[in-house]
Amino acid sequence: MIRQILAGSRFLIAIPVIGSFIGAMVTLIYGGITTVKVAVETFDNPAFDMTGVKHLSVNFIELIDIYLLGTVLYIIALGLYELFIDPKLPMPAWLHIDSLEHLKEKLLGVIMVLLGVSFLGEVTEWDGDGTILNLGIAIGAVIFAFTLMLTLPHLHQHSGPDDHPE
């Protein structure tokens, strides 16, 4: 009986799957609507100078952030669904997720890109004060830590008894 309860409880993962999917849809639709709004505003009130270019650049970098967040939520929804509910979910090979470790790797990769895009947005708005260096160092430290998290387990898995001479 407990076995049946535990086996059936995997469907509880449908809650974060649905929540992540709804979050992805809302975020991506919001990004799409905001893209149209930025485009309309750009041509309604054109400022064809460097200030206008900078403003437009910042707007679209922030939109990339929104789209990347939607992508992360979508990958979480698909990954959890595939891992816990339906491993035969038809998806492109590059999006196939076969373990929680694999899902974590995909998410960390997208998060690192998101951090880079966020930093790029800060750089385009930078007013010359020294705080950008602190932000860059902090983001660099987080990306470095994520890179270690992604590479150390693989290095440990691939090392065998022949790799360490005694």
Image (cartoon, rainbow, N blue to C red):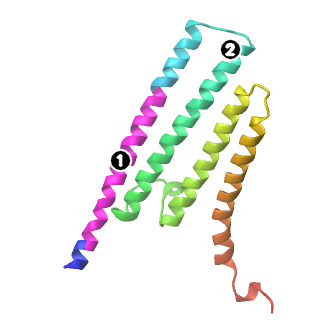
133 and 1: which one is in front?
133
Q: Residue furthest bottom?
A: 166
Residue in the image at 77% along x and 86% along y:
164
Identity of the amino acid at label 2? Gly
**Picture quadrant of residue 43:** top right
Please say if 26 is above or below 99. Answer: above
Q: Residue at x 52, y 37 (%)?
A: 67
Picture quadrant where residue 33 is located: top left
Amino acid type at mark 1: Gly
Q: Is residue 96 visible?
A: yes
**Quarter holding residue 27:** top left
Query: Magenta span: helix, strand or loop, mainly?
Result: helix
**Quarter of the image where the C terminus is located:** bottom right
Number of numbered discs: 2
Report the span colored magenta. 6-32
Question: Percent position (x, y) of residue 30?
Answer: 44, 29
Q: Which residue is mark 2?
A: 52
Q: Which quadrant is the N terminus positioned in? A: bottom left
Q: Residue 36: image x %, image y %?
A: 49, 20
Q: Is residue 87 at all visible to an observer of this figure? A: no
Give the residue displayed 64% in from the left and 20% down from the top.
Answer: 56
Dot 1: element: helix
Which residue is nearer to you in this view: 145 or 75?
Answer: 145
Instruction: Tell me whether the residue at label 1 lies in contact with that at label 2, contact meaning CB atoms closer than 8 angstroms.
Output: no
**Residue 77, relative to residue 154: is it above or below?**
above
Percent coordinates x, y for residue 38 in the rendering: 54, 19
Magenta-colored stretch includes residue 106: no
Location of mark 1 (residue):
19
Task: Identify the residue shown where x is 25% and y is 68%.
Answer: 8
